[in-house]
Amino acid sequence: PNTCSCTLNDDSTRPGLQVVPYPAGPGYGEGGETKICIFAAVGDPNGAQDINRVSAQVFHPDNTLKKEVQLEPMAGGPFLPLIAADLEGCFEAIKGLGIDTQQLSADLAYDIDHQIHAGTAWIWWGCFTYHIHQPDGRHKVVVSAEDAYGNQASKKTNYFWVESILELAVDFTSVNFGILAPEVWASKTGNSEFTLGGDGYPTVWQRGNDPACLWIKYDAMTTPGAPAESAITEFDAALTPGNV
């Protein structure tokens, strides 16, 4: 068998599909998952029915293995929103992306299309989940295929890029600093729970996929020594890339 794959590239400086991940939330411990799907055109001169197994290995930017996805042959019926329900419509969408980004030549697209209609090729697909705590950057996808007799196709490699997003949620709504005194610094260690509304502890929740520094500045608190009336009258924060 032989394999072919194509992905979208809307940034000329980065190869492959551009993925903007979902941040974590809205509740603590929720969200932060992005579904990514792989499509591969696989052919066999003896007929597409001889294709026995197609799999894809997904690698992190540091080249460590993230996931092995077993691809399945597409059949009729709806598979994904925003992609045509039938095989031919789906392939047309993928083919158009590949040609537009010059990752798939018109000649190769025609050849795949011809093989599909001749019954010697088929589209295989599978999905996996990107979790927000995993690294951003260029991810590699390696697709392999095998026929019913154990013959293996040459592996094909493609890439997709997970964009960096900086997003922190900060819960400083009612930090209890205890008894305050003039000219005396007061600090409060954060806790591991994120409870909007305040539980007396500050919490910073990493909702993005890129390490960040949170710089906080504030003016002097009013009426030092009177906790019931104390308040930070001005609060400002800046979020920058870097180590947490």
Image (cartoon, helix red, strand yellow):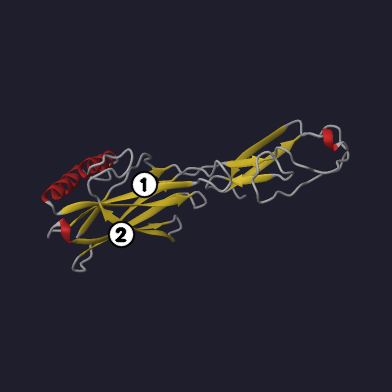
Q: Secondary structure at mark 2?
A: strand
Label 1 vs label 2: CA separation? 21 Å
Which residue sits at x=70%, y=39%?
172
Relative image position of residue 230 (x, y in whole percent): 82, 34
Label 2: how many residues lie within 10 Å, few (<14), some (14-19) or many (20+)? many
Q: Viewed as shown, does residue 165 lie left or right of 155? A: right
Tell me the quarter of the image containing the N terminus: bottom left
Relative image position of residue 220 (x, y in whole percent): 81, 34
Disc on the earlier residue, 1 or 2: 1
Q: Viewed as shown, does residue 153 lie left or right of 204? A: left
Report the amino acid beneath label 1. Answer: Pro
Determine the residue located farthest toward the front in the rendered image.
77
Relative image position of residue 113 (x, y in whole percent): 16, 46
The label on residue 15 is 1
Q: Nearer the viewer, mark 1 or mark 2?
A: 2
Which residue sits at x=74%, y=44%?
200
Report the amino acid beneath label 2. Answer: Ser
Residue identifier under label 2? 55
Q: Viewed as shown, does residue 203 lie left or right of 117? A: right
Determine the residue located farthest toward the bottom in the rendered image.
150
The label on residue 7 is none
Q: Nearer the viewer, residue 240 or 152?
A: 152
Q: Secondary structure at mark 1?
A: loop
Q: Quadrant of residue 104?
A: top left
Label 1: how many residues lie within 10 Å, few (<14), some (14-19) or many (20+)? many
Q: Viewed as shown, does residue 137 lie left or right of 92? A: right
The total of numbered circles placed on residues is 2
Q: Quadrant of residue 214?
A: top right
Relative image position of residue 212 (x, y in whole percent): 59, 46
Q: Is residue 182 above or below residue 63?
A: above
